[in-house]
Every structure is written in structure tokens, then in C-alpha cells.
Amino acid sequence: MDEKVGKAKRGIPSKKEDFNSWYPFIVEAADLVDKRYPIKGMDVWRPYGWKAMRLIDAITHREMEFTGHEEVRFPLLIPANLLQQENRLVALLKRAREEGVDPSELRLDEDEAGFEKEVYWVSNAGESELEIPMFLRPTSETAMYTMFPLWIRSHADLPLKIYQIVNTFRYETKQTRSFIRVREIHFFEAHTAHVDEAGATRQIGEDLEIVNRIMHDLCLPVIMARRPVWDTFPGAWYTIGIDVVMPNGRTLQVASCHHYRDQWAKEFGITYEDEKAEQKYCHQTTYGMSERLLGAVVGVHGDDRGLIMPPAIAPIQVVIVPVTKKDGADEIIAACNELHTTLSTAGIRVKIDGRDMRPARKYYDWEIKGVPLRLELGPRDLADGSAIAARRGGGKKALVISNIVTLVNQELSEIADWLRNRAAAQHSDIIKEIPRISKDENGDWSLDAEIDEASIYEIAFDGSDAEAEVIELLTGLSFLGDATEEYPEEQYCCISGKPTKRRVLLSKSY
Amino acid sequence: MDEKVGKAKRGIPSKKEDFNSWYPFIVEAADLVDKRYPIKGMDVWRPYGWKAMRLIDAITHREMEFTGHEEVRFPLLIPANLLQQENRLVALLKRAREEGVDPSELRLDEDEAGFEKEVYWVSNAGESELEIPMFLRPTSETAMYTMFPLWIRSHADLPLKIYQIVNTFRYETKQTRSFIRVREIHFFEAHTAHVDEAGATRQIGEDLEIVNRIMHDLCLPVIMARRPVWDTFPGAWYTIGIDVVMPNGRTLQVASCHHYRDQWAKEFGITYEDEKAEQKYCHQTTYGMSERLLGAVVGVHGDDRGLIMPPAIAPIQVVIVPVTKKDGADEIIAACNELHTTLSTAGIRVKIDGRDMRPARKYYDWEIKGVPLRLELGPRDLADGSAIAARRGGGKKALVISNIVTLVNQELSEIADWLRNRAAAQHSDIIKEIPRISKDENGDWSLDAEIDEASIYEIAFDGSDAEAEVIELLTGLSFLGDATEEYPEEQYCCISGKPTKRRVLLSKSY
């Protein structure tokens, strides 16, 4: 009964039936953000949402420290002339790819470097027009690589590994969605420089290990895929995209790693003196993540009662609800306070809900916010020396108060395992084998079955970019790219029929 | 001898003789920032400087949590029409003050609200012109007070106490200086709303207690002064400025608290329903601080050998320098590593300098960076079971390794005390009694002595705004405002000769 009352009161749309309504509803109902700020795509982070984001950031800081990255802070504004330099590089690489030559053999005409980027422009300040217009960083390659030549002199300065967590900006023209597609982005970016290509390649390996550890804490399974050439980050040799599969089957890129080889270094003059006193170009990488991580947590773990927060980033891990009657209320409150002190001293994020209302109403509030564990303490429990633990995902048991820290930590750990397993099961349900694609007698491509957009597909594929484009048109899906693991044994390419181990993923992406 | 070599190598200007050269030199030599970024007044924070700033932020977070403020994050961009609303308020208050009437009795003409603010404007994005231009926040009153009416319904929602630590922007036309006058500012702002004026007044009291606790950690004495009316923050009833006296005698405002009464609430419609179901306006306050705190730390504590970091915010509190010869080096290194583990496990920020160079050269490097304590460990020390502790401010002693955590913490605590006492002595040296000001027979004001710009002056003053202006013109100093403590006994006003307890401070300010 309570469950129905709860749902009706909350008016939460069904996640399964209408994910696209459920998601925007829940981010506001759980007090993560307020979307009523008068600029589209720029939400106000409310305390609860910001706390969750800061806990994700804390995990990122931990990983960066562990792997020897140093934190910096670059200016938000970038002079326009630096963007020209970046655009020149991008145009150069594009033409080199088209013509099948090495980029260093090409020279560009001035007008090939267009300003097509979706950036916000600052051209005026106070009452004056700026001499050089500036833009708000969409990401910091150009800002940072202007400074790198000043910081890197010799091989002893390498590897250089820095990162920052900052606000970045994109003038999105598509529909905005909290955390997923916003115009001011809470963004993490790591930038590294190495003596050679192998050093940069090892860095990409380290980045993917970091991704794995972060995703373990967030209880999120991911797909790592080497993006196809046409979806490689501008200026990169290759890009590995890390996607979370949302419940509607769409993939959400939550992180990406880019191997730049020495392509940016050549454009920005980032060189070092090696042990033989020769000047060489650095090889570089970047690794980015954003508030989309929180969007993925919301989307994957939540249900029709609200959010479910993974314990590692839950702003409140345990909520204590006193179950009192008029008689003996003081004693219960005192016991709850003691419980609170014990748990918070042990480093557990805990809150007492002492509001003057029925316990059931309190339960609803904390369920919407996704607090993983609730402790109820009433006179009978107190007499038994225990508290009733109710998991957000279901299940109740009595915990002995004298051993409460160990027992609560065990509950939180089991909740995390449960979330991980549940998400992994959803994830593998969604990855399907793509229907057979073939050419008919007229030379037209056709599909043997209809594509379900709420799935990810994997195919054996060994075709050209042009054939990939045909597949995208036919299926309405996009190439996520090559999965990091090939097929263990050869398969037949779905286009040519030739044997191949290439495992290619397709999806509808955000 | 070593000392001279060190100074020559560093080329540090004399702090006492040429503070204005010493300061910019040291912020770069100590790797706090890099000023070579191609936009004036926007420095790149290097890892060491950013770590110090983040440690100051951690103290701020601690204080905010302790006092029940919640952290939020507002968008950087603010639509132009909200600035119009703010300007209207400022113009209204100005006219009310000039005409000596209550602001609520006035109505403004449209053109009285000018756009005189020094803000950066965003009017274009991608290739389109924005419908409504936006500006980069110089501070967030307008952004926040647009949302407050949506969040505050009844007295139960009050007090509302929120804060954020963000980047803000001012198009400075004056000379820029790292941390002190920059165009992108690392900024803290707390905003509160209360049921009445008394609630807001109590908040100001709490803010000043927080300031005191933070300044204790930074080992900085401050002046708190109620700013004169003409230097009150736009839209405020009154402003309390918190200044640090820099070694050149200039005051640097590092924090400020503003009591808004219900002036902003009336402009933005921020009301609540009281217990009698009546709609009332909220009373508000703000409290701001910035990276100027770090500028004050650099300026006050540093010396001709470099920075001296207060232990509470030192990115490295202890540096361990192995003093090795060829024989027995391994044993020394092993002992240093063990020392490092012991100290870092105890939460002390410690680093081993294992570089292959003479210890004396290492000492210079860590002196420039202001590491408060150095531990030297050589074969003889190891045999004695001790390490030599050298304080950055001078003084050496042997510490018993078996009790190293306690002894190092004691050293750090004594270093902090020493910094506090030293800064307090400098501070009170600088505050002098202002020379007598008098009117001659022609009715002209004159000074009895020359003003030394490298001092702060306090005067007994009970005159009008016009008389204050005369004093500013005569002395070349600015009114810091009324000291928070009056004279215990009546003095004679330096203008009228009438008895008064008002203690007014004057200075040359940054």
C-alpha cells in the first residue's frame, strides 16, 4: 500500500516505459539541479547534486594523485588566434587523411582553417571592444599547449602529467539535458607529454585502468571502443571512447582518451632535448570526463521510486529515522544521536531525519534521493540492542548496534555489489548481434531484420569507411568503433563475407 | 657563505627596499603561477600555487560545513536583463542616500540605471548573435536572487545559507598583480537569507568569527572596518571590509561582509510567509573572499630567501633531504623513506628530495617555496637515532626519530605561532596616529606633518562625508572606515575638536 501512495505522491514517470520523461523529472525531484535558471542548458547545481559531483571529483583527484598527475588551473578565456592554430591543425589532418599522405608533407592555405567551432565569444568588456576577441574554453588544448614549450626543455621534464577540473562551454544547438548535454560543463581534463609514441601509448593504458577503477566505484559497466576515423577527436591519431549504455539503449560517452602522437607538438612547437642533445617533438595524450558520469549514475541505477546512489558517491550513505511514540521519544532520539556520532566518526556520511512527520513520509523523501541505506530505530529495536536496516534496493534486516560500523560498511559494500551486478546484467542484455547485412542483385544493401534502436549491436566488420557509412544509413545507428577486445576466433565480415576478428560496435548515441 | 651564494643565484629583489619588485618576482620564482599566458591579468596556476589555494579552500569548506552553509554551483553566465535590475537597485539606493529619503519612496527613470560595470560580455556563440547578451559573473547576487524566490516559501525555509567557490571576472583597467588584482578571480561567496534584520546581523557576526578562524590558520592579522557610506558595496546597507596590511603599508581587502537588509529582496521579490501567514521580505547578507588571501600570505610572510608558508596551507609541510656519501647511501635512503611513511601516515604533507645534487642547492629550492620545516638525515644523525630539523625562519635542532610525529607537529605549531607573532608585530608597527589636521584663518584645511604612505593611520573623527573627503584629498589616503572597536574613552575629533569615541582608519589601499 505504502508503495502505491508513494508513487502517486511523487508522480514519477515510469522509467521503463518512458525513460525520456523519467530522467528530467528525477534530476529535479531528487534536488540534484534546478533547471529554472533563465539560460537554457545551464542548470543550477543544488547542494545535494553538487555534493554527489564533488564526491565523484574526489575519486578523480585520488586517481590523479595515485598516478602522479599534478593539478593546475588554466584561464577560462582563450585568445582567438590560438583557435586559428588549432583549426589549422585539424584541417591539415583531415586533408592528409583524405589524400592518404603524411600530415607533415602538407601546407595549408589560410582559408582552409575555418571557425566552425561552437564556442561562446567574448568581444567586449565594460564599454570597450577587445583588441583580440576571446572565447570560453570548450577544452584546453590550445591554452595549455601554448605554455608547454615554456615548461618542457629536456627529457628530464618528461613525462609531464597535469590535469584540471573546470567549467567548460559549448554552444549546444541540440536539445539540452541535465548532465548529458549542457552548455556549461563541469569537466575534467588530463594532458600529458612524453618522449615518444610508446610513452604516450602507455599513458592511454594507464588512463583506461583509471577509468576502470572509477567505474567500479560508480558501479557502472562501460564499453570501450576505438572510435572510427571520422569520429576521432580533432587533432588526434586515435580516440578511445568510453560509453555507458543508458536504459533506453542509447550510448552516453562519459570519458574519452586521445593519442595525439606528435601532431599537436608540431603545430605548437613542443620539443625537448633528448639525451644526445637533439631536439625532438613530444608525443601527447589527453583524457577527459565530465558531469555525464553523474548523468549515467542517475540513468542506470535509478528506478520508479527515485535515484539509487552508489555508496562511494552517495552524499548521504545512511539516513537514521527515529521511530518514536510520545512515550520514550527522548531515549530514542538520544540513541539515534549516539548512532550518528559512532557512524560519522568512522567516516560514514550519515544524517538523522528528526523532522516532525510520519516515518513513511520520510522514507519516500530519502528514497527519491537514493540514500542507499536507512536505519530505523524504535523502542523495540532499542530494547533488542539493534537497528533495522532497510536497503534502498529492497531487503530489511536487524543490525546489532554494538557492532554497527562493521555491519553498516558491510551493507554498503553489498549494496555496491548488487548495483554492479544489476547494471552488468542490464548492460549485457542490451548488446545484441546485428542482423545480417547483404547486397542484393541490384547492388543495393539490405538488412535482414528491423533494427531495435534500444540496443547496441556488435558486428564482424572489415570494410571501408564508405561501407561503414552504408551501414550507418541502413541501420540508423552510429559506429561506436572497434571494441577493445577482438573476437577470439575469426568471423565472417557482415559486408564482404571475408574472415575477420574485428568486433565493431554500433549504437544510437546521445 | 651559503646564504650569499643562494641570494645571488636566486636574484631575489630585496623585500624591504623594493616590495613592488619582490612580490611579482617571488610568485613566479616559487612556482605559484606563470604569468606568460597570452592574456594580461590571467595567470596560469602551477601545481604548487594551486595546491596552496586548494588548501585555503579546504579551510573555507571546513568553516562552511561547521556553520551549516550548503555548497551550490551557479552558472557563470548571467543574462543582461538581470544586471539592469541590479543597476536599478544601486541607482535607487544612491539617490535615496543623496536625497536623505527611504529607498522605497523613490521611483527611478529608465535611463538612471546605467551599465557602468566592468564586465566581460558574451554576445555571440558559434556563428549566431545571442538574443539576450550575457556577461561573465563578477559576483553572483543577480544570478542567485533570481532563484531565491523559487526556493524560499515560508519561514521554515529560513535561514537559507549557501556558498560557492568559483571563477569570477572583472575587466580590470588598473595594473594587474598576481592574486591581488586579476581579471579571472578564484572567488568564494556565501549568500544568506533571514527572517529579519536581526537574523542577518547575527550572520555578519558569525562571518567575522569565521574570518578570525581562517586568519588564525593563515597567521595573518587583519583590520576589520565598517566602510564609509561611499565605499559600501552596491545594494548594501553596510559593508565590513577585512584588510591585511602589506609590508609596503598598503591595505589589501581580502574579505568583506555585506548586510543587505531587505533592499535586494524588494528588488527581486524574495519573500516568505511568516507564522501568521503574512508575506514578508527576507533580510540578506553576503560574505566574500578570494585568492587575495594567498597574495596576503605571500606578501606578509615571505622574506629575501623566498616564501614562508603557514603550516596549515603549506603544500609541503616537511621536506626530507638525505645527506649521503657514497658509502652507506642505501641505508640513509631507506631511513628517509621510512620517515616519509611515518609522517605521511600521520597526515603530514611530506616530500623526499632525492635529486642527485648537493644538499645546499636543494635547501635553496625549498626555501624559495617556503616549506616550513626541513629534515636532514645523514649517517651521524641516523647513528644517533635523530634527524636535524631546520626551520624555514631559522633555527636548527635534533629531533628523536622514535617520537618524530609528535615532535614535527610541535615544530609546525611553533612555526605557526612564530609567523603569527612576527606578522602581528609588523602590523602594529604600521598603525600610527595621524598627524593633526586643522583649519587655518582662511578656512583652508592643513596638515601638521607629512604623511608617510607606508603606514595606516587611525584618527578620532566625527565629521561629515564632505569633511572626510577633505581629509582624503589632504592626506592622499582613503577611509578604510570605522574600526570595529571604538576608543574606550572619548577623544577630540581631528576636524571639529568635539569629543567622540569613533576610531576611523585611513590607508593607501590596493
Image (tube, coloured by chain):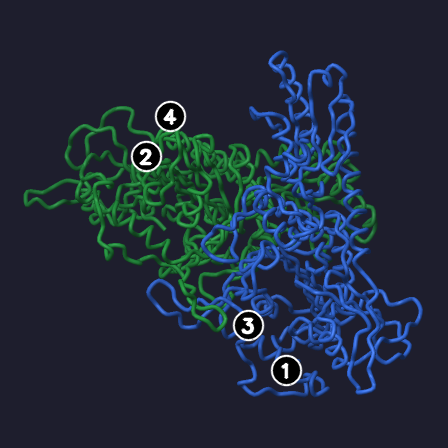
Chain colours: A green, B blue
**Marks 3 and 1 in Cβ contact (< 8 Å):** no
Amino acid on which disc 2 is placed: Ala
State left or right for residue B506 relative to residue B170.
right
User: Could you give the CA–CA distance between mark 4 and mark 3, rounded to whole angstroms?
Assistant: 56 Å
The local secondary structure at tag 1 comes to helix
Label 2: how many Cα within 10 Å (few below 14, some 14–19, many 20+): some
Mark 4 or mark 3, whichever is nearer to me: 4
**Which label was assigned to residue B117?**
3
Is residue A204 in view from this perspective? Answer: no
Query: Who is closer to the viewer here, B437 or A389?
Result: B437
Chain label for disc 4: A
Residue A23 x/y as whole percent? 46, 54
Q: Earlier in the sequence, mark 3 or mark 1?
A: 1
Do tags 3 and 2 sit on the same chain?
no
Q: Identify the element where label 3 is drawn.
A: loop
Asked if labels 4 and 3 share a chain, the reply is: no
Q: Are marks 2 and 1 on the same chain?
A: no
Q: Is residue A11 above or below residue A15?
A: below
- According to the picture, the residue beneath numbered tag 4 turns out to be A276
Residue at 66% from the left image edge and 81% from the top image edge? B94
Q: Which residue is mark 2?
A: A483
Numbered disc in front, either 2 or 4: 4
Foreground pick, A155 / A478: A155
Which numbered marker is on residue A481?
A: none
Mark 3 vs mark 1, foreground winner is: 3
Task: Indicate the position of residue A238 as horizontal and vertical percent values.
Answer: 31, 38
Dot 4 falls on a residue whose secondary structure is loop
Mark 3 burial class by Cα count in 10 Å: few <14, some 14-19, many 20+: some
Do the residues marked 2 and 4 share a common chain? Answer: yes
Residue displayed at 43% across by 52% down: A180
**Number of callouts in the render?**
4
Residue annotated with mark 1: B92
